[in-house]
Image: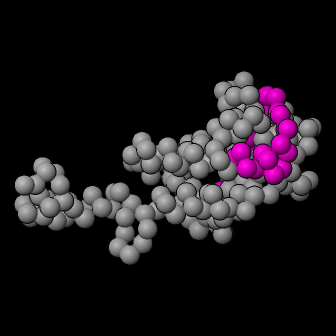
């Protein structure tokens, strides 16, 4: 007896194409582990470095960490999404312990996010893809919340190269929020200072 909708039942009915599509949607590829597991492993094994200064903010670099795209996150089973969220919460907690265990930042803050990867993703999905990382820093105690009174602005940037994620929490209202310069100019000025 077959379960309705099981792979064996679909094969028996001649719907092999549906079986193949179902396997791809779940993230399985022939001979390779699921992408989700590889991404979670990259987050947990990432080399962490960064710095903290009370007036200058907090920076954490997760060298080797990869992100799931927003489209991949939306397709995940809730338990798989929970494992991914837990991995980012653990990575944020580890970063806090390594960089500045007692660091606390008060809002308003600007969060600058740099994603480095072989390919680019849509900017509209990039902030959502990093939601769990920002929530991890909130859970670790770096920021009191992630509502607009604390996180006033999120700035996104992508580069091509080996995988890495960098997150900076900076006081909001410096040169980068001035209306006289563009975001690109502000990023270059801030990068030149650090």
Residue plotted at (83% across, 42% down) = 101
Q: Position of residue 173 (x, y in %)?
A: 84, 33
51 or 186, nearer to the observer: 51
Nearest the camera: 164 or 186? Answer: 164
Indicate the position of residue 112 as horizontal and vertical percent values.
73, 45
Give percent across and percent down for residue 1. 7, 55
Name the side, left or right, on which 107 lies relative to 13: right
When the figure is inspected, residue 86 is found, relative to residue 139, above or below; the finding is below
Quarter-of-image position of residue 29: bottom left
Q: Quadrant of the C terminus?
A: bottom right
Residue situated furthest top in the rendering: 149
- Residue 7, given in percent of the width and then of the height, sits at 18, 59
Q: Which residue is at 82% across, 33% downward?
A: 105
Residue occupying the point 49% across, 43% down: 82
Stretch of the chain drawn in magenta: 92-116
Residue 175 visible? The answer is no
Scheme by which the image is coloured: one colour
- Does the magenta segment cover residue 168? no
Is residue 103 located in the magenta-colored stretch of the structure? yes
Say left or right for 59 vs 4. right
Q: Residue at x 85, y 45 (%)?
A: 100
Is residue 3 in view from this perspective?
yes
Q: Height in image: 110 above or below 87?
A: above
């Amino acid at each position: 007896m077959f379960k309705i909708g099981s792979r064996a039942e679909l094969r028996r009915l001649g719907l092999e194409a549906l079986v193949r599509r179902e396997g791809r949607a779940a993230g399985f590829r022939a001979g390779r582990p699921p992408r989700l597991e590889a991404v979670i492993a990259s987050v947990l094994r990432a080399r962490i470095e960064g710095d903290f200064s009370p007036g200058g903010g907090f920076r954490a670099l997760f060298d080797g960490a990869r992100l799931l795209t927003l489209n991949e996150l939306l397709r995940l089973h809730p338990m798989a999404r929970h494992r991914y969220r837990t991995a980012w919460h653990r990575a944020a907690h580890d970063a806090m312990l390594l960089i500045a265990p007692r660091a606390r930042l008060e809002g308003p803050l600007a969060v600058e996010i740099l994603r480095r990867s072989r390919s680019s993703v849509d900017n509209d999905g990039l902030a959502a893809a990093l939601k769990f990382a920002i929530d991890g820093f909130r859970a670790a105690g770096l920021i009191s919340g992630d509502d607009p009174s604390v996180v006033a602005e999120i700035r996104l940037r992508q580069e091509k190269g080996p995988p890495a994620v960098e997150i900076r929490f900076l006081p909001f209202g410096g040169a980068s929020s001035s209306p006289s310069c563009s975001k690109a100019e502000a990023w270059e000025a801030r990068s030149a200072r650090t």
